[in-house]
Amino acid sequence: MTDTKKSATLSLNGESYELPIFSPTAGPDVLDIRKLYAQAGVFTYDPGFTSTASCDSTITFIDGNKGELLHRGYPIDQLAGKSHYLEVCYLLLYGELPTATQLEDFEGRVTRHTMVHEQMHNFFRGFRRDAHPMATLVGVVGAMSAFYHDSTDISDPWQREVASIRLIAKLPTIAAMAYKYSIGQPFVYPRNDLDYAANFLHMCFSVPAEDYNVNPILARAMDRIFTLHADHEQNASTSTVRLASSSGANPFACVAAGIACLWGPAHGGANQACLEMLKEIGTVDRIPEFIARAKDKNDPFRLMGFGHRVYKNTDPRATVLKQSADEVLELLGIEDNPLLQVAKELEQTALHDPYFIDKKLFPNVDFYSGIILEAMGFPTSMFTPIFTVARTVGWVSQWKEMIADPQNKIGRPRQLYLGETTRNYTDIENR
Ligand code: CMC
């Protein structure tokens, strides 16, 4: 954050107030209103935080008009093409690309933490067997605070580091266990000879009764999905993690709060909602009906997997995943699947429809990730848990950045109160 000595003047009730302006390294200038209430006695009003910077950060930058996503300055298409998920995790957590030795050490640390406490198996068994894996994830990740007491002291940098590694390492194991539990299969222990993505496929798809060999092309596609979802600056779930941790809550509880937020269909739940929508459309001839519904102001229906709060040109993650989707479908020989035909036709129809063009609604990352995950054999209920596994490093990196910031204070938004003013209590017989 650079103090450029620029300022804006606010005129209010005959008084003038100088608001300092900060210039970021990239993106629009930011008005500093921290002293506004103390000086002018007014709040600002911004539901949905469409114009409000809630923090300063050096991790991720998005230019929604250019369709650009940078992690520590590196464009996402370069990272998705040349790097891999754990290297991107290192970059997000520590700020620089690792040397070969640093990467080997980091991969070793993550790999050695992949198993969960054996008593957690009993904890899982308390859930209904048909529980949605996201419901299980919210509970189990929150419960990590009960299993790993020795990494909940946020004032200790060593404990913060251990908690970060534990979360990144154990989330695939927990997500795979939630899946296995929901289909009545035994839990599969992690294999430390496999890389992060291949191990996740192994824990989801292998069974003790027979051999399972991870297809390297599918493992690469899985790794790419993880990489593309790793962080996305101050989105709803990340802001939830930051707000929860601003009170000093432990990292497992905060990440559980982030998972709860990610579950919603306007956020991480969109990948499941998108695939379910494609199934509901069913055949290409029904697309016009659904496009008409999406445009109808009186119909709450929206095309899932389209639109984004920040991207108003293209979603750069979607560009990479579209290519990945083509590769996976070709590999699996399912290019003629009716669902995929609906997806391809819907994409083309929306991209050429003036409603979607005018409102800058393009396919987002969730449109293509769902197609790939379906082709890999994941049920729709696992789509958002997979997003959760990937985003954990983003939450953890943003949490670490925030805790280390000496300016960190509890998040406490104000409100525009429109309710009753003071009135006297009426006894029940007089109401
Ligand atoms: N289908 C039809 N119309 C839409 C859609 C859509 N998917 N998205 C936005 N609109 C319309 C909306 O009705 C509004 O029209 P009007 O100006 O006439 O009232 C206009 O576009 C602007 O919409 P908004 O709701 O004000 O925009 P937002 O920035 O608040 O919402 C969004 C962003 C992602 C929640 C929204 O586009 C949406 O609901 N998309 C579908 C869900 C989805 O795919 N979410 C995944 C986002 S990417 C993964 C992630 O980062 O979590």
Image (tube, grey):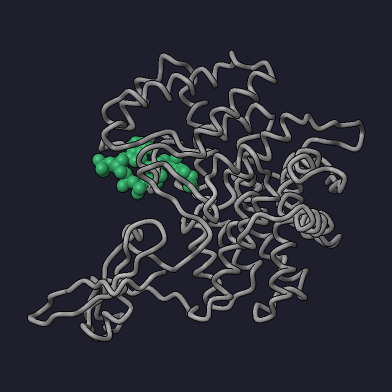
Q: Which x, y percent locates residue 317? A: 51, 39
Q: Which x, y percent locates residue 260? A: 56, 57
- Residue occupying image coordinates x 27% and y 30%: 355
Q: Quadrant of ligand 1?
A: top left
- Residue occupying image coordinates x 44% and y 68%: 55
Q: Nearer the viewer, residue 68 or 363?
A: 68
Above-or-below relation of 99 to 214: below
Residue 248 found in image quarter:
bottom right
Q: Is residue 194 left or right of residue 288?
A: right
Above-or-below relation of 32 to 299: below
- Residue occupying image coordinates x 69% and y 64%: 164
Above-or-below relation of 40 to 27: below
Q: Which x, y percent locates residue 187? A: 83, 46
Q: Nearer the viewer, residue 402 or 90?
A: 90
Residue 384 found in image quarter:
top right
Q: Which x, y percent locates residue 21? A: 29, 70
Residue 213 found in image quarter:
top right
Please say whether residue 125 is visible from this viewpoint. no
Q: Nearer the viewer, residue 106 or 33?
A: 106
Q: Nearer the viewer, residue 32 or 129?
A: 32
Q: Is residue 277 left or right of residue 390?
A: left
- In the picture, which quadrant includes the N terminus? bottom left
